[in-house]
Image (spheres, coloured by chain):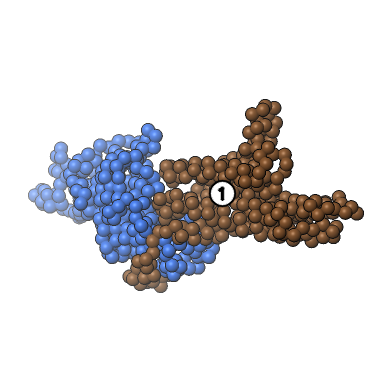
Chain colours: A brown, B blue
Amino acid sequence: MSTSTLNSVTDASGRPGASVTTRSGLSFVGVLRSEWIKLWSLRSTVWSFALVIVVSVGMALLIALASRLDQSGVAIPPEAQVGYVVTASTVGIFFAQMIVAVLGVMSVTGEYSTGMIKSSLTAVPKRLPMLAAKGVVVFVATYLVGLGSILAAYLMASLVLAQSDISAGLAEPDMLRGLFAGPLFLALIAVFALGMGTVFRSTAGGIATVLGILLVLPIVLGLIPAEWATSASPYLIGNAGPEIVASSGFSEVKEGWQNLLIVLGWVAVSSVLAALLLKRRDA
Amino acid sequence: MIQAQALSKRYGSKTAVDSIDFTVQPGKVTGLLGPNGAGKSTTMRMVVGLDRPTSGSVIVNGKPYREHKAPLREVGVLLDAKAVHTGRSAYNHLLALAATHGIPAGRVREVIELTGLESVARKRVGGFSLGMGQRLGIAAALLGDPATLILDEPINGLDPEGVQWVRHLMRHLAAEGRTVLLSSHLMSEMALTADHLIVLGRGKVIADAPVDAIINSGGRSTTRVRSPRAAELAALLANPAVIITGLEPDVLEVVGLSPAEIGDAAARSGIALHELSALRGSLEEAYMALTQNEVEYRTGGSNDFVAADLATSEPQEAAR
């Protein structure tokens, strides 16, 4: 360290915090901005979101190509055409849910593993505003990226399918539903994962639990030959989630909004648990 | 100003902090000293609400930390140089903390300059040395231009120039009327930096007094005597209240007599003295004496020397 720096210490601290205005204070908007900066200043965020787009577009390409081979030479009714385009545009979302689940968990467990959480909670000692801000930021960022990736996937699918004379406008009800509910599904999964990450405080534990609940639990319940297992199955977040985006016709819970409520229920439980534990535990 | 009242923290059956009372005054540097496991870090964590006290309370500038409208402007804290996400740049780390309080980016650049981090500000913190991590931690603590600073082992990992810089900065901040509380294992550093010491041992306050008072009370006043007739002189001074140690054939260290008394006794018997020097007690000695019985993990040996007397002979400052 040079002498000039030593001098500048004296100079600068001689008129301390000239730019720290008396108006500055802790506010929720400030905490939101802080979390937004935190999210986007990590390379892992950029990579994860880039992967979401790549996976969505890639899957759209694969499915569109497969549909084209399937349907060569046969005229397709318009309703079915919409089905093809919607499927091709949204199928990537179900793979992308794993990426945003990991992102959601790590947005908080990354703070625990590095010790950053101590800085964060010192800046926001009431704690819950930090968790709420993280939730909002993760939700909004994931929603926007999800929306972009579905639009990109739609363009890719349309481009490929157009060669087989299959097309569907964005304004078709099913397409619109996919366009807006797909990102919603992704964003809710990310917030659910954020809650579980806060509960577990460890990346490995959080990711294992979230992916277990999302992907393994539906399979396990499906294998149990009991009536309760069959009737409970539609209420799993892993089964209800995809139903928000497009009805499969297999679920007993038919309406999209009912499935949305189920998913919101899981998100609420995860968030409330996270809030209680964050508030109570020592950091 | 930091005021703790009957502050306690238990982890299961283990008591980390045992009903301590203390006040950290503005305008001076207060050192929090104690062996490992004495409760220093736990105490600091409770001040800023990271750990919840099991009982008792601690307030900063008149309120519990979390009740403040702008906590970062009340208290700047360095608890752990590694309380930073390793994947983020120093600049973005500070910017994110500043954003919570609406502190402008200009202030972020100011503290980066203040701590000498300009050249690495855009680099990811994961590659930082311990010393750079400390500087970043100090930069974060200074962000809100706080009235109170709490720094846990701030000179850990700093090079000699960095140590000098921190000492200079702490003294400067205290001179501006701020409250400065820092912990360190390096007693010699405390002697140079702190005005006042709070010594913790096994979760209790075992001394709370100005640095000078602790040095004078804890350090045994020892006199070094060099004489060609050292053995004779030793026999002459022998007394149950006096401890004489022969270091070399012609050198004695005498505890329990003043240099004047030793010199007079030697003169009366016509013994020549080649050296007669009072060894001032050091903070190290005082600290060792204070904490001898309070060390949690002791390496062996026992010494019941003065710790008990000191706690009573150095009256704790009443909380104001």
In-front residue for pair A205/A25: A25
The answer to whether A242 is drawn above or below residue B27 in the figure is above
Q: Is residue A60 left or right of residue B43?
A: right
Q: Residue at x 26, y 45 (%)?
A: B5
Quarter of the N terminus of chain B within the rendering: bottom left
Secondary structure found at label 1: helix
Q: Residue at x 44, y 70 (%)?
A: B106
Q: Which residue is mark 1?
A: A191
Confirm whether residue B193 shows in the render.
no
Q: Amino acid at mark 1?
A: Val
Q: Which quadrant holds residue B9?
A: top left
Residue A175: horizontal and vertical position, in percent? 71, 55
Residue B175: horizontal and vertical position, in percent? 27, 64
In-front residue for pair A50/B178: A50
In-front residue for pair B263/A126: A126
Q: Is residue A282 left or right of residue B286?
A: right
Q: Residue at x 69, y 39 (%)?
A: A251
